[in-house]
Amino acid sequence: MMLCEQARRSAYAALTCVSLTALATGALAHDGGLTGKIGEARFEVTCTPEAQATFNHAVALLHSFWFTPARKAFEDVAKQDPSCAMAHWGVAMVARANPLASAPTAKAMTEGLAAIERAQSIGGKSQSERDYIEALAQFYRDYDKKDHRTRVVAHEQAMEKLASTYPDDREAAIFYALALNIAASPADKTYGNQLRAGKLLEKVFVEQPQHPGVAHYLIHTYDYPPIANQGLDAAKRYASIAPDSPHALHMPSHVFTRLGYWEESVSSNRTSAEVVKKELASSNPMLMGPEALHAQDYMVYAHLQLGQEAEAKRVLDEIRARDNVDAGNHLAASYALAAIPARYALERHRWDEAARLEVPKVAGFSWSNFPQSEAVVHFAKGLGAAHTGDVAAAKASGERLKQLHDALVSMKQGYWAGQVGIQAKAVAAWTALAEGRKNEAVALMREAADLESATDKHIVTPGHIVPARELLGFMLLETGQPALALAEFEKSQAVEPNRFHGFAGAARAAELAGAQEKAKAHYAKLLEVSAKADAERPEVKAARVVLNQ
């Protein structure tokens, strides 16, 4: 369903104002000092007044996942007051990086364990400090013997106990809410953990409306289709709470994307990417890091839904022209590098381009660390090959997807193994169709769609590279089943609203099924979403013909 235009204008105006302010001031807190507009966090610890002020600043940075300056600020606390054990707790929190995205690297786990052991050695000066340190130790202790999921749940349980022991400690409630989100199962369609987290955070947001962590974690909490609208208030406010934080500028687009606010998503991510590049310019003006790449993936996705091919191509060309892309050891960066060219080909239905895609070459980066990212390329290649009739190439892509699936299984990354398995099934479906096995093709594609519906997309991506149910809709169209296709397109749009091809596919299916009023309604929405397109897509031309009759 298209969102209220007045609400869209309100969100867009607020976001644009914040975006312009952030770019104009360029007041980045990269030195770890007490400068920059990053929101307000009050976390009382037993240390000197100077160290307390720095600690609050460090916590505010941590809550917006601005890890480099946050780590420096926590290290400054340790220098200002060597007896402050919580300074080292902060360093250990930073070592987890984005705990919602992926497990920390082995190096990060080693550093985090050392920091938490240092905190234990110094000793918290209050029972609550000792409890905070012990709760985080649950995540790091025996990491070489216990799997990531086990330690995540242990930390969540420890934070639940801490939050209930200190009901007046708002930071305990906030960090417990974060722990609930980290531990949430992607297969839990009741969103139990998320709704519990939301209840905690909403209460604190009333009391502390300028707290960056509350706004940030509310967005993550509601980053799911059935509850996304509940995150809209936090999405509108977060960028104004912490306008100097690149992540705060990007995060609203998670909710905007869920709701189909494409223009707002473009604005949010363009500003975030520019602020990151400005921050890095002093050290290396050619460097494009993970935060910028992640924002640009969201931005390209939004541009393509608006029919803005030239704008999407501009971002793609910028990435390809950079010799110094810093993918580091980041899932979000590797995923963006694979996803952006795949999206550009697939969202335009340029199957020939998709079939020619190759895994990007990035200096110093090993794709073997991220099979789920490499899989994006082979998924696109396989779909492209199948659509262009190159069955051998499609089968080769399918085989590579199976290998990557097996690699993820051996790496104990069950969620991602499942997602790559869905991609492999979709490629197998279109390969079967290319070989004329229509019934088998539809059955496989329906299986893929149902499997995808049973889980949720990961936070590293704005959306599935192509929704499996949308692919099912197009396959049903190709096999002469428009009424069934229409039902699948409408189901897909209920989960991923305002997608260009969701409207285009539904309109064409309705037209062929003889549902002319539905066809006109979907075509009208297609024209609405593509009103600022920079290319005349064939689907838009078809919409104009039908609506002008």
Image: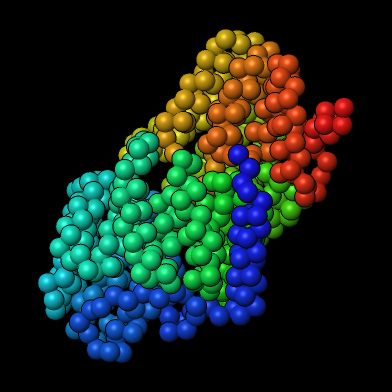
The answer to whether residue 360 is left or right of residue 400 is right
The percent coordinates of residue 97 (x first, y second) are 38, 61
Residue plotted at (53% across, 74% down):
244
Residue plotted at (38% across, 65% down):
205
Res 9 quadrant in image: bottom right
The residue lying toward the viewer, choosing from 400 and 547, is 547
The quadrant of the picture occupied by the N terminus is top right
Res 166 quadrant in image: bottom left
- Residue 63 shows in this picture: no
The percent coordinates of residue 223 (x first, y second) are 46, 48
Q: Is residue 522 above or below residue 97?
A: above
The percent coordinates of residue 177 (x first, y second) are 31, 56
The residue lying toward the viewer, choosing from 397 and 151, is 151
The answer to whether residue 26 is left or right of residue 238 is right
How many numbered circles does the render carry? 0
The answer to whether residue 424 is left or right of residue 356 is left
The quadrant of the picture occupied by the C terminus is top right
The residue lying toward the viewer, choosing from 35 and 219, is 219
Residue plotted at (61% across, 46% down):
3
Colouring? rainbow
- Residue 542 shows in this picture: yes
Residue plotted at (43% across, 53% down):
220
The percent coordinates of residue 193 (x first, y second) are 31, 46
